[in-house]
Amino acid sequence: MKRILITGASGGVATLIRPLLRADYRLRLSDRLPVPDPVDGEEVVEADLGDLPALRKAVAGVDGIVHLGGYSVEADWETIQAANIVGCNNLFEAARLERVKRIIFASSNHAVGFYPRSQTIGIDAPVRPDTRYGLSKAFGEALAALHAYKYGAEVLSIRIGNVGEKPLDRRRLAIWLSPRDLVQLIGIGLEHPDIRHEIVFGMSDNDRAWWDNSNALRLGYKPQDRSEDFAEAVLAADDGKSGDDRVDLNQGGGFCIAEKM
Ligand code: 15L
């Protein structure tokens, strides 16, 4: 069984996917915070993304990395810079120094959040970040390309919509990603024989999508879950009108006006 490192292992997304990944991989879990409830066979290695020597120890000997670590919403520049710029650079650098080629980078829809919902975009659309956070995710994708083409890394950047057991609101009907569909995308990133740097959108089979996910389908992605199965209840609870067009008409929603969250 391959051994993979999950960074940001104490976070919500990691907690949802760990039980699913355990079926196929031996997991090494790292975070700067204590990792909740490690089970038999899961190894925990504490590492702060600011600490390159600690990160080198965390990545040493693994077959691949799922980089979920970092700051996951908008914040002041110092916070984003430390976690998502310097931290992300350290992670890729640790992987390069320890000769770990396969990396799944958890990018975000907020790298392109200022596209209008009326437009369907593909991965060829230039980045249009809605936050400093989204900007840091665009940086991460560019860093992935640098390491792929210059140093031989093999990276899948997944522009994650919103991961959860179900879509939370009207906007999330377009961008929802079920845990098992995320695990399928991660599996493609870890196992596909022909990856240099690829970008895909992290969404399930959503009728209301704003993204053309043909690159994911080309790589073999067959999403199992559909947000439309939840649409009736979601639409009844949320009319999608916040009173601010920047929020209601852009793909990034509330991030488009967020300064700190
Ligand atoms: C993200 O990138 C965030 O990490 C997550 O907390 C959600 O807010 C999600 O985007 C979203 O757009 O719903």
Image (tube, rainbow, N blue to C red):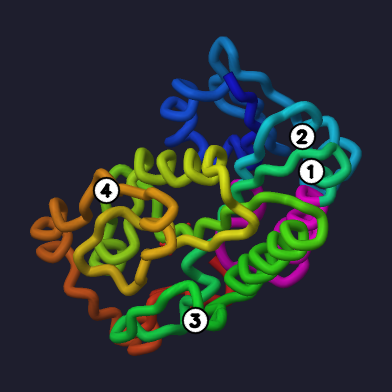
Viewer-nearest of labels 2 and 4?
2
Label 2 to label 4, Cα distance in Å? 32 Å
Q: Which of the two labelled residues, at mark 1 and mark 4, occupies the earlier sequence position? A: 1
Label 2 to label 1, Cα distance in Å? 6 Å
Q: Position of residue 60 (x, y in %)?
A: 81, 30
Pointer 1 residue: 95
Pointer 2 residue: 59
Q: Quadrant of the C terminus?
A: bottom right
Whether residue 248 is visible here, answered yes or no, is no
Q: Secondary structure at mark 2?
A: helix
Label 3 to label 2, Cα distance in Å? 32 Å
Q: Secondary structure at mark 4?
A: loop
Question: What's under tag 2, amino acid-wise?
Answer: Val
Q: Which of the two labelled residues, at mark 3 and mark 2, occupies the earlier sequence position? A: 2
The residue under the point 16% across, 57% down is: 228
What label does residue 166 carry, if any?
Answer: 4
Position of residue 240 relative to residue 66, above or below, is below
Q: Position of residue 190 (x, y in %)?
A: 56, 40
Dot 1, crowdedness within 10 Å: few (<14), some or many (≥20)?
many
Q: Residue furthest bottom?
A: 245
Question: What's under tag 4, amino acid-wise?
Answer: Lys
